Image (tube, rainbow, N blue to C red):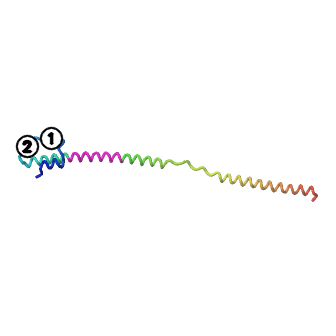
Amino acid sequence: MIDLTELLRVFGPLKQSEQPASSIASPLDTGGEQGSSAVLVEVLREQLRKAEEREQQVQQEKTWLLSLLEAEQVARRELETKLLPAPRPAPTGKVRLWTLAILLLVALTGLVVALIHLELIGGLTGG
């Protein structure tokens, strides 16, 4: 048999009681086992109610955390799927082509000038 004072020491006083304290105390004072069982049942109901409240709070927190995680994942996916603009082709291919064309033109011009210069000099010198 569990003593009422021991229950109150361990679990604290009851906050909600369907029975007034006098009706609980009277069977205990007489030493009836039915009174201690009723107190034990009330204590256990109170513990069960508190446990259910804690479970509901944990479930709400879990739901909230899952929604935060889902929002973070959506934001991350959107960030990853944003594509950068396609890189522009490097103009170095066209620049090299034009540079080579200009160098070839300068070289040909130089060759033509040199040949014309030799002919002019040869024509002037009579040879």
Residue at image position (9%, 48%) is: 34
Q: Is residue 93 left or right of residue 61?
A: right
Instruction: Look at the numbered discs 1 and 2 and tell me whether their residues touch, using CB distance below 8 Å.
Output: no
**Few, some or many residues within 10 Å of mark 2 (<14, 14–19, 20+):** few
Q: Is residue 90 left or right of residue 122?
A: left
x and y percentages locating residue 119 in the rendered image:
88, 56
Residue 43 among magenta residues = no
Name the residue beneath numbered marker 2: 26
x and y percentages locating residue 42 in the rendered image:
16, 45
x and y percentages locating residue 59 in the rendered image:
30, 47
Q: Which residues are magenta?
A: 47-65
Identified by mark 2, the residue type is Ser
Name the residue beneath numbered marker 1: 18
Query: Upstream in the sequence, badge 1 or badge 2?
Result: 1
Identified by mark 1, the residue type is Glu
Q: Quadrant of the C terminus?
A: bottom right
Q: Is residue 120 left or right of residue 96?
A: right
Q: Nearer the viewer, residue 33 or 126?
A: 33
Which SS class for mark 2? Answer: helix
Residue 49 among magenta residues = yes
Q: Nearer the viewer, residue 25 or 41?
A: 25
Q: Main secondary structure of the magenta part?
A: helix
Residue at image position (29%, 45%) is: 57
Q: Nearer the viewer, residue 92 or 24?
A: 24
Q: Residue furthest bottom?
A: 127
Residue at image position (90%, 56%) is: 121
